[in-house]
Image (cartoon, rainbow, N blue to C red):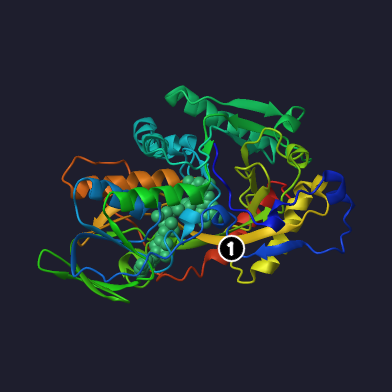
Amino acid sequence: MAIPLAVNADQRQVVAPAAANLRSAAEPAFMPGFKTDPYWWDAAPRLHEAERPLPSSADTVVIGSGYTGLSAALTLARAGREVCVLEQESVGFGASSRNFGMLGRQYKFDLTTLIQKFGIERAKALYEGCNQAFAFVNGLIEREGIECFHAPSGRYVAANTPAHLDGLEKELSARKEHFGHAFHMISRADQPTELVTEKFIGGAVIPEHRTVHPGLFHNGLAERVRGAGAVIHSGTRVVSMKRSGDGWRVETSRGAVAARHLVAATNGYTGKATPWLRRRVVPIRAYMIATEPLDPAVLAGVLPGKRGFHDCAHEMEYARISPDGSRLIYGALTGEVHDDLRQVALTLRAKMLRLFPQLGAVRVGHVWTGRCAGTFDYFPHRGRHEGMHYAMGYCFGAGMPFGTWLGDAIARGILGEPAQTPLDHPEMPSNPLYWGRPWFLPLYLRYQAWLDWKDGIRA
Ligand SMILES: Cc1cc2nc3c(=O)[nH]c(=O)nc-3n(C[C@H](O)[C@H](O)[C@H](O)COP(=O)(O)OP(=O)(O)OC[C@H]3O[C@@H](n4cnc5c(N)ncnc54)[C@H](O)[C@@H]3O)c2cc1C
């Protein structure tokens, strides 16, 4: 696909494999022009909309300009509704322009776990939500012709232990049996066709999963939303809202807007403006780096299958090749809280080199962080609280399908169309000890690390 990537002269340089390996460890770990912004923003910069006065009223106010909010806005605007999207930062500033770019079908719980917990019928009905969300996001990108390197690159899931390998085969066999989803197992001996590392003992390929450039996907969606007539106001923070007649009065940092309908689409960035939701979603930080541009031969010596990869550890590692084939993108440290992104870059680089020592003295071009949202029952939720619509509670590997699909479902609900989903739970649980500050995350992470250690996994 001929999308010009906005790379600067410095980033255009290509490091030959031999040169990369010869560079001494004392040389800087950061490439010139190193950035603490997402790599995706080079090709898909975050923009502030030209400031214009807020309308005094709109049919629907949407809080948040990520995939969820924009998907809702698109469906409503195309149906002729007057939609006002309010974003506190630049457009798509949240996880929607920061994520890994992998499209799949998954909850936190595997299908086999769902079957154990809920029985076959309920499990299948719930998992059907993953199928619908996956079909929706792929259909949206194709239907709208959004150029975002949408590719059936597949996913490689690497097993850290024999128990993982066994569990992977059982899980993927169940998905094949009940839904016909293809997969094939990879032995340790064959693993170098997918992933060149000593760390794992084999794994599984899910060929139908896809990758995108998340920033270009988001920008394409935002363009469609503007084209449909909705107005996005960036730099406009929603401060509070209250019921007014049969609608809402929404107070923002730039004045008030009256709305018939209100949609909260703030996921991991949910804040004080919506205290009920804030008590129900747990913001979880994640971190990624992008290397400097590398020779294709070097990248082929890491991920020859060119698929998105992750492992099965609780402390997960994941990597992919950038859509233009120039860089390795690597992530880990999920859930940890770090404010010094330079230090994060060094830690991630060290972990990446333990996994792929063949990268030698590779330098880091970008480091960034983003937030997604966990829930107390581990499921995404779409619902209504005192009349306010919301969809949130999605994490890694799930936010693009669920965000776009549930955003659309909210819009269809507002339009009076049938739009039930398996995720319209009657209740979104909270915890009496949780008020929006995830104090328990460090304990939870220690527990996860202990589980990995017990399984014999060493960082
Ligand atoms: C590092 C990382 C990797 C990930 N990898 C994947 C992946 O590979 N595949 C996948 O499917 N998903 C992935 N995800 C998850 C996915 O990115 C998110 O679930 C999804 O983008 C959420 O979209 P959203 O629109 O609901 O929220 P967001 O995109 O987070 O947008 C919420 C917006 O609300 C705004 N906001 C909040 N409060 C207010 C307020 N009071 N007033 C105005 N605006 C407000 C925020 O500024 C923000 O821009 C990943 C997430 C992260 C962080």
Left or right, 167 with reference to 97: right
Residue shown at 35%/52% (left/top)?
70
Q: Is residue 338 visible?
A: yes
Q: What's the amino acid at mark 1?
A: Asp
Residue at (82% x, 45% y) in the render: 16
Task: State the image coordinates of residue 114 (x, y, percent, origin top left).
Answer: 43, 38
Tag count in the figure?
1
Q: Is residue 374 visible?
A: no
Relative to residue 130, is residue 97 drawn left or right?
right
- In the displayed structure image, the side of residue 240 where residue 189 appears, left or right: right
Mark 1 residue crowding within 10 angstroms, few (<14) / some (14–19) / many (20+): some
Residue at left 55%, top 39%? Answer: 2
Q: Position of residue 138 (x, y in %)?
A: 42, 36
Q: Nearer the viewer, residue 52 or 84?
A: 52
Q: Is residue 245 left or right of residue 28?
A: left
Q: Which residue is mark 1?
A: 37
Viewer-side residue, 32 vs 239: 32
Q: Name the quarter where the N terminus is drawn.
A: top right
Of 399 and 251, which appears nearest the observer?
Answer: 251
Q: Is residue 444 above or below residue 297?
A: below
Q: Position of residue 51 (x, y in %)?
A: 34, 70
Q: Secondary structure at mark 1?
A: loop
Query: Is the CB of mark 1 within 8 Å of ligand 1?
Result: no
